[in-house]
Amino acid sequence: MSNQSSKVKILIVEDEILLAQDISQRLTEINYHVTGIAQTVNHALQLITENQDIDIILIDIILKGDRDGIELARIINDKYHIPFIFLTSHADTHIVERAKSVHPYAYILKPFNDRQVSVAIELALLNFSKKTPGKDLLEPQDFTANENQVLQIKDCLFLKKDHHFERVPLAEILFLQADSNYCTVYTKSDRFVYSTVLKNIEAQLPINRFLRTHRSYVVNIDLVSGFEGNMLFIGDKKVPVSKTHRDHVFRLFHTI
């Protein structure tokens, strides 16, 4: 998996081009990939259609043209099911009520700093993974970024590395290994270390694709290439199978 493909992809919908370029630069500096910048609803829909792998959308509520960001958000909810964050400097009651009706997953109040952008993205992904919208636009966002956060969205895990999320397809994950209170997620091209116990990350994985083989290991069933004795071969690694899990594990591999 290339470094570019692992980056979380973000679309910016903002009609103030200088502000949009500033946001784009901020996101790039914290290792997110900006798919594009749209100034109108029509342009945004075009970019969404052309880029099926967009992970999150930043939307200014007030846009040029006959449709605003709230109407764009409604279309995204109905047709595309992508998490979005509202950008706003407006506290007008009517706008706030309309914005709440489309259930944004987070929001950023203008003016903002790098930390607020980063936290809003993490919060939006967290809320989307849990299928819970963000809070009232006028309430302060009470959220502390969690370096141990692991999110499953569609067929990917969103894993934290160097204070940003990377998107890792489930098919790219080889196995998980526990070491005391730490857990390492090994992928085909990288590894992610968390200060959390194995079961916390295991809980985010689909049980039909990942299997516990040992108190310290969980493997991707589809990537097991063979076995010998009490060891499974995954890529160029060997993963042990404990006596407790042996019957279940090898019964599975003898039947597939």
Image (spheres, rainbow, N blue to C red):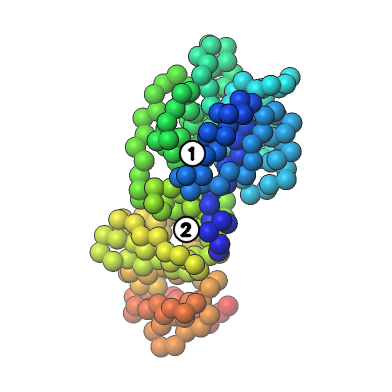
Q: Depth check: 36 or 88 in front? A: 36
Asked whether residue 210 appears in the rendered view, the answer is no
The residue depicted at 41 percent of the width and 88 percent of the height is 229
- Going by the numbered disc 2, the residue's amino acid type is Leu
**Mark 1 / mark 2, whichever is N-terminal:** 1
Say which residue label 2 marks. 205
Please indicate whether residue 40 sits to the left or right of residue 165 in the image: right
Relative height, residue 76 to residue 66 (above, below): below
- Horizontal and vertical percent position of residue 154: 57, 51
Total label count?
Answer: 2
Image quarter for residue 116?
Answer: top left
- Horizontal and vertical percent position of residue 187: 47, 66
- Going by the numbered disc 1, the residue's amino acid type is Arg
Q: Depth check: 43 or 232 in front? A: 43
Which class describes the residues within 10 Å of circle 2: few (<14), some (14-19), or many (20+)? many
Asked whether residue 193 appears in the rendered view, the answer is yes
Relative height, residue 188 to residue 234 (above, below): above
Relative height, residue 91 to residue 78 (above, below): above
Query: Of circles 1 and 2, which is in front?
Result: 1
Q: Are marks 1 and 2 in contact (CB under 8 Å)?
A: no
| Residue that extends furthest to the front in the rendered view of this protein | 18
Q: Secondary structure at mark 1?
A: helix
Disc 1/disc 2 C-alpha distance (Å)? 31 Å
The residue depicted at 52 percent of the width and 34 percent of the height is 23
Which image quadrant: the N terminus? bottom right
Which image quadrant: the C terminus? bottom right
Image quarter for residue 211?
Answer: bottom left
Say which residue label 1 marks. 26
Q: Depth check: 194 or 28 in front? A: 28
- Horizontal and vertical percent position of residue 60: 58, 26
